[in-house]
Image (cartoon, coloured by chain):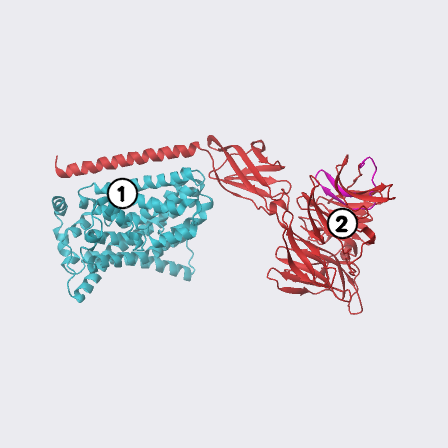
């Protein structure tokens, strides 16, 4: 393992030296944070100005603004919560807590990690910074992936909203929970085989992880200062990705008419594909996606609803943008293939049985 | 081979194997799903409305679009008349007539296919119809309050939903009950009683009496005739037909006839499933009034008696000195309901009312009894060719009064007075009855007595 770590670390020293572990947040990261915040603020200002001044915008532009802002409004609170939890994990929780608390056997360890989301009620957007924090804290990348994929679904808020929306109808709630749990463990089992765990990460994030675990300092003052620095660092990674992901999701929804997807809804096989594409495009958070899809429940089959509810929280435009801050593009492609096939399978099984 | 390469190739093998297994499973389940054909996702039918109204629909929702469904591919047990249509993911089975109470219907649709996939499937569905409550008026015959009683055709239980002194008549609506009571002077009062039991008076056009009360549960409208009594009224009314929406303004307004004139009637009735009424003017002329279209009035002829309107609103029974006739609505074409020979004798129909039901009509045939020298009543089901006895009064001197078929024409309620003309009256100024009045409920198909209650004015 140390051998593989070293290989990935080569040539990253410059970045380490400027990282938060060496002092304050780097200027480049601050610029990215400013870009992300400015982009989000610009969208809100544009929306407010055009609506108050009654400036007539083309329908497609209005739709784009509404859809993009809705993704941001849904995600932002959870992104901030996720960053805060990540800071708590990295700086305020004892270093060996997770190592000691989790089972030693890899399989049992991943099973335990996949239900960790019950204690951390954030949606998928917030789980990205949290998963990053868990990697920094010593979990393997595969274990962190297991958490990242399971937590948005095996999560109290998601469970409650899904139960409120569907109850026990057609086993949608059970299928969603079971599907999310199994897919997360399947991915964890698969990527655990990849011995070069840091090779799954982007060069920049891998380099940050290779630096010895930060010393939060014994003084409370130091710890708070590092917390602020880490917030700026993480927000600088995540907020631009959220902005760009929301813009992409809004654009695609404007370009691809939703009706095209809905017309495919009555076929037991095509409806699953349509719902997965819909989930990918609209990038709605797992905490509210059950209510979003509820009106479609009369048109679409239960299996396709399950595929939407399982695939959407794990892979969508916004999540790919967020996860790209952490994982290599090749890894995201592999992850997308596995999750898409598994989510489709869960949906097909539900359609066959229900 | 270096360690890292071994590791990567091991991961690659596991990745490829996982993808292959998932692809095979996805393809397998996709094929199985395609091959099983359309499935029934859910179904929707109002089990209460389906026994009360014609034209009710059972909707079968499938999990995918279905090709057009032919009627020959649909079977229903017990057999009932129906039509079939399909659109998108819905197969609609419309029942031509109301179904039987408390009966399990099994439906099978064969050869259901997706428009793009030849694989067919059979959809099976079964549902049990409701047995809605029925209501009747029970007069105590003493100083005790009268009761409006709720019961069921197939149940023995009864409960009084309203009680008051001297109840003259009532009408039932979905969310309220309208009661007519008589005061000591013989004047009427109208009261609306909500589900919560809160009672509210409906103001009448003055002092006087209410009669011929009827409610239209489809429109929520109450109709009645009003006759002024005493000097306190501003305008005199005589058997004037009024309507009121108890859930709306609560103010009765006269129903207008030809030229906007008030309708003074001998009898009247709502035409089910429409906004029409049939009324018999005091000159015995019978008219059909469309209350929704500026009182469009259609004359239907002149007859001494106005009987019941058929449950499907297609006809009304009238009678003259030669017996009953069926008058088609809204055209007015009259067809005589000529009584078939009963027990080898030609019965006397007189002006006895008849009720038209599918396959024939029900009426009180009276035959001469040489032993007593009088007439004996028999309730018969007449097909127009043969007459089948439904009910014979236990006491030959008894009489048969109102005959009311259930909305689904499965049962008939007949008002009987065991003592006949000699029975003691309850003495009510309006709508009096014999103290012994009894209502008997019969299964029309078999003539079986399914229930008997002390009371009258059955509301299904």
Which residue is labeled 1 in the image?
Answer: A187
**As displayed, is residue A273 above or below residue A132?**
above
- Occupied quadrant, residue B181: bottom right
Do tags 1 and 2 sit on the same chain? Answer: no
Quadrant of residue A329 in the image? top left
Looking at the picture, tell me which residue is in the foreground, B131 or A54.
B131
- The chain letter under disc 1 is A
Work out which quarter of the rendered image holds the C terminus of chain A and state it: top left
Q: Position of residue A208 (x, y in %)?
A: 17, 52
How many residues crowd around disc 2 within 10 Å: few (fewer than 14), some, or many (20 or more)?
many
Residue at the image position 18 percent from the left and 56 percent from the top? A95
Query: What is the chain letter for disc 2?
Result: B
Q: Which mark is residue A195?
A: none
**From this viewpoint, which residue is outermost toward the top?**
B118
User: Which tint is chain B?
Assistant: red
Residue extending furthest toward the bottom: B232
Residue drawn where x is 25% and y is 35% of the image? B16
Residue assigned mark 2:
B416
Start-end of magenta stretch = B341-364
The cyan-coloured chain is labelled A
In-front residue for pair A203/A104: A104
Q: Where is residue B232 in the image (x, y as percent from the top left)?
A: 78, 70
């Amino acid at each position: 393992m140390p051998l593989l770590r070293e290989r990935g670390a080569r040539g990253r020293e410059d970045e380490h030296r400027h990282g938060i572990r060496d002092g304050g947040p780097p200027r480049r990261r601050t610029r990215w944070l400013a870009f992300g915040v400015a982009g989000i603020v610009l969208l809100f200002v544009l929306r407010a100005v055009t609506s108050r001044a009654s400036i007539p915008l083309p329908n497609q532009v209005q739709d784009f603004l509404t859809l993009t802002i809705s993704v941001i409004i849904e995600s932002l609170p959870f992104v901030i919560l996720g960053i805060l939890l990540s800071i708590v994990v990295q700086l305020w929780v004892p270093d060996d807590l997770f190592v000691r608390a989790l089972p030693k056997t890899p399989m049992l360890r991943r099973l335990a990690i996949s239900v960790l989301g019950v204690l951390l009620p954030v949606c998928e957007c917030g789980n990205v910074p949290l998963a990053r924090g868990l990697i920094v804290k010593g979990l393997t990348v595969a274990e962190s992936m297991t958490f990242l994929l399971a937590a948005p679904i095996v999560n109290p808020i998601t469970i409650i909203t899904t139960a409120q929306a569907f109850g026990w109808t057609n086993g949608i709630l059970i299928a969603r929970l079971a599907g999310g749990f199994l897919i997360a463990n399947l991915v964890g089992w698969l990527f655990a085989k990849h011995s070069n765990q840091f090779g799954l990460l982007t060069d920049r994030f891998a380099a940050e992880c290779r630096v010895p675990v930060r010393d939060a300092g014994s003084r409370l003052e130091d710890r708070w200062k590092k917390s602020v620095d880490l917030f700026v660092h993480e927000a600088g990674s995540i907020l631009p990705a959220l902005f760009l992901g929301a813009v992409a999701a809004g654009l695609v929804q404007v370009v691809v008419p939703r009706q095209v997807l809905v017309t495919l809804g009555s076929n037991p096989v095509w409806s699953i594909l349509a719902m997965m594409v819909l989930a990918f495009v609209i990038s709605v958070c797992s905490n509210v996606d059950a209510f979003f899809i509820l009106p479609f429940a009369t048109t679409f089959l239960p299996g396709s609803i399950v595929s939407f509810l399982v695939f959407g929280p794990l892979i969508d435009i916004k999540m790919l943008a967020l996860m790209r801050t952490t994982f290599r593009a090749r890894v995201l492609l592999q992850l997308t293939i596995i999750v898409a096939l598994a989510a489709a399978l869960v949906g097909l099984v539900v359609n066959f049985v229900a | 081979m270096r360690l890292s390469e071994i590791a990567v190739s091991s991961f690659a093998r596991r990745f490829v194997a996982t993808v292959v297994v998932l692809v095979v499973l996805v393809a397998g389940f996709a094929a199985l799903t395609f091959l099983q054909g359309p499935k029934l996702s859910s179904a929707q039918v109002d089990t209460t409305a389906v026994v009360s109204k014609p034209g009710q629909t059972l909707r079968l929702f499938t999990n995918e679009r279905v090709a057009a469904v032919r009627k020959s591919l649909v079977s229903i047990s017990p057999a009932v008349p129906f039509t079939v249509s399909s659109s998108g993911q819905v197969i609609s089975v419309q029942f031509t007539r109301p179904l039987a109470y408390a009966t399990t219907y099994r439906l099978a649709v064969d050869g259901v296919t997706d428009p793009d996939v030849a694989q067919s499937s059979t959809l099976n569905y079964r549902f049990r119809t409701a047995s809605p409550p029925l209501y009747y008026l029970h007069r105590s015959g003493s100083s005790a309050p009268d009761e409006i009683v709720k019961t069921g055709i197939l149940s023995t239980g009864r409960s009084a939903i309203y009680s008051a002194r001297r109840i003259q008549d009532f009408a039932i609506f979905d969310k309220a009950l309208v009661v007519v009571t008589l005061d000591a002077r013989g004047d009427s009062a109208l009261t609306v009683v909500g589900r919560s039991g809160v009672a509210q008076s409906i103001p009448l056009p003055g002092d006087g009496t209410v009669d011929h009360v009827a409610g239209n549960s489809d429109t929520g409208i109450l109709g009645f005739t009003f006759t002024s009594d005493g000097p306190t009224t501003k305008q005199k009314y005589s058997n004037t037909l009024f309507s009121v929406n108890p859930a709306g303004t609560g103010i009765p307004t006269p129903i207008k006839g030809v030229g906007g004139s008030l309708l003074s009637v001998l009898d009247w009735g709502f035409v089910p499933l429409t906004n029409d009424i049939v009324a018999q003017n005091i000159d015995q002329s019978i008219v059909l009034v469309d209350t929704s279209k500026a009182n469009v009035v259609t004359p239907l002829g002149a007859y001494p008696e106005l009987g019941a309107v058929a449950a499907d609103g297609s006809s009304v029974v009238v009678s003259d000195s030669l017996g009953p006739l069926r008058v088609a609505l809204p055209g007015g074409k009259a067809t005589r309901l000529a009584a078939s020979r009963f027990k080898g004798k030609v019965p006397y129909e007189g002006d006895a009312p008849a009720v038209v039901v599918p396959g024939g009509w029900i009426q009180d045939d009276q035959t001469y009894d040489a032993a007593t020298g009088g007439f004996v009543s028999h309730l018969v089901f007449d097909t127009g060719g043969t007459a089948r006895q439904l009910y014979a009064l236990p006491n030959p001197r008894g009489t048969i009064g109102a005959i009311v078929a259930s909305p689904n024409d499965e049962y008939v309620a007949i008002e009987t007075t065991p003592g006949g003309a000699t029975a003691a009256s309850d003495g009510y100024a309006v709508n009096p009855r014999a103290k012994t009045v009894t209502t008997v409920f019969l299964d029309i198909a078999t003539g079986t007595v399914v229930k008997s209650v002390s009371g009258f004015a059955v509301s299904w």
